[in-house]
Image (tube, rainbow, N blue to C red):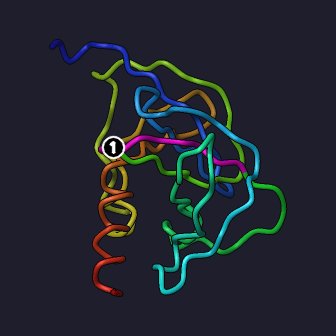
Amino acid sequence: MSESRIEGFVTVRLGDACFGAPVLQVQDVVAEAPLNRVPQAPPEVAGVMNLRGRIVTAIDMRRRLCLPPQEGARISVIVEHGAELYALIVDDVGDVVWMSRADREVPPVTLSAHWRALIAGLHRMEDRLLLILDVEAVLTLSTHQAHAAA
């Protein structure tokens, strides 16, 4: 495929930062849903929810990105990884934006190593940077930590 292909991202906000989740991985967006806590789960696992009969593991993206907690309503972006559904809990969801793959930049070295491991790249937008989430890395690291805690 050509490097100039167009990519779509669902924009999400965590604090002042704007992230993009690849639109092809996003299954749904749901308002705050009731969560059931999971004993001995890693700290970023907020719990599990029932979404139309499927059990969905909820990841608190503030914890996953080492951001301070925030009170108030949160929104879940439902993504699929393998055969499982996950809810990425974020502060807010924005629009879908379309960007040229050729315009994607590598994460700067000034980002913490933790963030660089979770960011696939970035796009410059008119008024901000869009940090592209590496959904697989976000979920894979959570899985490794869950197994280490067991």
Q: Is residue 88 left or right of residue 111?
A: right
| Residue 21, position as x, y percentages in the image | 47, 38
Q: Which residues are magenta?
A: 75-82
Quadrant showing the N terminus: top left
Residue furthest out toward the right: 72
Depicted 106 relative to depicted 3: above or below: below
Depicted 59 relative to depicted 32: above or below: below
What's the amino acid at mark 1? Ala
Identify the residue under disc 1. Answer: 83
Q: Is residue 45 magenta?
A: no
Residue 138 or residue 127, whichever sits in front = 138
| Residue 113, position as x, y percentages in the image | 32, 69
Residue 32 or residue 4, whichever sits in front = 32
Residue pictured at 35% horizontal, 47% vertical: 134
Quadrant showing the C terminus: bottom left
Q: Is residue 81 magenta?
A: yes
Residue pictured at 45% horizontal, 22% vertical: 8
Q: Quadrant of residue 148?
A: bottom left
Q: Main secondary structure of the magenta part?
A: strand
Q: Is residue 132 left or right of residue 19?
A: left
Residue 60 or residue 49, whichever sits in front = 49
